[in-house]
Image: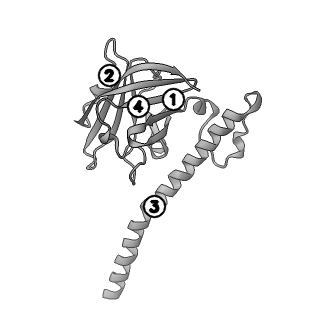
Amino acid sequence: MKKWLALLMIVGGIILIIYPFFKEHQYNKELRELENALSLVANAENDHAELEELEDFKFSKEELSNVMELEIPYIHIKQLVLNRTTDENLNIALTQIKENQQPGEGNFTIAGHRGYRDGRHFSNLEQVPIGENVFLHAKNKVYKYEIVSSEIIEATDIEVLDNQAGKNEITLITCTVSGKQRVAVKGILKEILDRE
């Protein structure tokens, strides 16, 4: 009986160790499919992309046209931003928290998981210091924001997402390591550049 219990504990331990790597592999596969689809759309002639070539692809052409990219040079990330926050989307990329947001207008809000490993999603968000720049790449424009605050807030402090009269901001949100609170990093729009 003790041998079976020991064997069961070993197998259970191996599964617990392997599971995060399996999930990471799955999410990376979905991210590669999304990147391939974006490339197909960008390179399509006459606005005709062969998205049906992609196996089990979950995004429509309209959803792909709304994908943005957030760049934070200080922590060396350049991540896709999907237009809706769902559990599935958060596992693949960063997501817009509020619907129908326009970059450079009001408080543009983005959520991201901490990720299983360093450098994925917003795992190092709290390291971005005040004064650093972040860039939101959207269609043919780049929105440059300067970080003005970084704080730990309660999960219920949703007013951080509200628009402030006369301010064009970006708010980046992720969980703390414990998952009980949130890291909220805010930036102010400094300029809008044409995308090369």
Q: Residues within 10 Å of mark 3 (few under 14, many from 20)?
A: few
| Residue at image mark 1 | 137
| Residue at image mark 3 | 21
Instruction: From the image, state whether disc 4 or disc 3 is nearer to you.
Output: 4
| Residue at image mark 4 | 134
Whole-percent x and y of residue 39? 65, 39
Name which residue lies at 26% across and 37% down. 155
Could you say whether the residue bearing mark 1 is in a helix, strand or loop?
strand
Name which residue lies at 34% across and 16% down. 167
Q: CA distance from mark 4 to mark 3?
A: 30 Å
Whole-percent x and y of residue 145? 39, 25
Instruction: From the image, state whether disc 1 or disc 2 is nearer to you.
Output: 1
Mark 1: amino acid: His
Q: Is residue 62 above or below residue 31?
A: above
- Mark 3 vs 1, N-terminal side: 3
Instruction: From the image, state whether disc 2 or disc 4 is nearer to you.
Output: 4
Name which residue lies at 38% across and 39% down. 74
- Mark 4 vs 3, N-terminal side: 3
Q: CA distance from mark 1 to mark 2?
A: 22 Å
Q: CA distance from mark 3 to mark 2?
A: 36 Å
Whole-percent x and y of residue 140? 58, 23
Of all residues shown, which one is farthest toward the right?
A: 46
The disc label shown at residue 162, or none: 2
Q: Which quarter of the rendering shows the C terminus?
A: top right
Could you say whether the residue bearing mark 3 is in a helix, strand or loop?
helix
- Mark 1 vs 2, N-terminal side: 1
Mark 2: amino acid: Asp
Mark 4: amino acid: Val
Tell me whether the residue at label 2 lies in contact with that at label 4, contact meaning CB atoms closer than 8 angstroms: no
